[in-house]
Amino acid sequence: MMDRSWRLHARSEVLYLSLLMATETLDPTLPQRILIVGTSCAGKTTLAANIAGRLGIRHFDLDDFHWLPGWQERSRQAFTEQVRQHILPEPQWVVSGNYTSAARQTIWPSARTIIWLDYPLWLVLGRYFRRTFRRIVYREPCCNGNYETLGNAIFRHDNLFFWILRTHYSRRPRYRRWMREGTMRATWIVLRGKHETEAFLARLPHRGRKISA
């Protein structure tokens, strides 16, 4: 029991030091360009909105650039042009979203900090079901003014549930390789659960209201 308690204490100390260094990276006196990545429904947009509010900088969600009304997708070229026109000229930003095939040529090279929400699958799926239910029942707009429907959530062959299952584990090796190789010349922050993310946010300067998931 003592050995287990010591290991938990040591892990807590390592986590504290890691979060301390991570939040020092987001020094509000320096220009901030922050990219948040991770599995769909992990909470990228909520975390980005919280960071943007606390640091007093703009938040952009890549879903709003990818989707047109009626769930029509922009072409990769049009998406890239939108990003170059609306995000890259800004001196500071927090961007939420993956879209690595296009964003790695635009957003990733400009980011000073990359926050990876490397959450367990059970947590992501729980958030998926809660978010989908809320959006359908309360008609919450998302993704550039679109609305979730029961048909989209269940009957589409490319629905988000199966997308999460396909991509959750396949992204990890790529992100770990890019982080290890330092390809993007950015500081990486890896948050592996709700408590780590809450501890990370708690250490940031609070200049705005907290956004709930």
Image (tube, grey):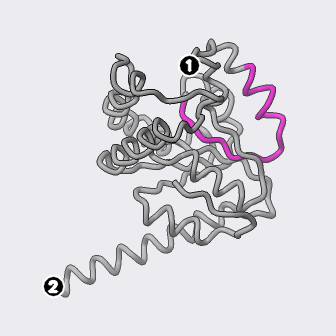
Residue 102 appears at what percent x and percent y? 60, 23
Q: Which span is picked out in magenta?
A: 81-98
Say above or below: 119 vs 138: below
> In the image, 129: left or right of 41?
left
Say above or below: 98 vs 92: above
Question: What residue appears at the point 70 percent right and 15 percent down from the top-left corner?
Answer: 78
| Nearer to the camera, 7 or 74 | 74
Question: What residue appears at the point 62 percent right and 50 percent down from the top-left corner?
Answer: 48
Is residue 87 magenta-colored?
yes
Q: Residue furthest left?
A: 1
Is residue 100 magenta-colored?
no
Mark 1: which secondary structure?
loop
Say above or below: 25 vs 72: below
Mark 2: which secondary structure?
loop
**Number of the label disc, if any, that sits on residue 94:** none
Residue 112 appears at what percent x and percent y? 68, 47
Residue 85 appears at what percent x and percent y? 81, 26
Task: Estimate the spatial distance between the alpha carbons at disc 2 and disc 1, rounded to whole Å.
Answer: 54 Å
> In the image, 42: left or right of 114?
left
Q: For the residues carrying marks 2 and 1, which lies nearer the camera in this image?
A: 1
Disc 2 designates what residue?
1
Question: What residue appears at the point 31 percent right and 32 percent down from the top-left corner?
Answer: 165
Q: Name which quarter of the figure residue 26 lies in.
A: bottom right
Q: Amino acid at mark 1?
A: Trp
N-terminal of the pair, mark 2 or mark 1, is 2
Q: Residue furthest bottom?
A: 2
Q: Amino acid at mark 2?
A: Met
Disc 1 designates what residue?
71
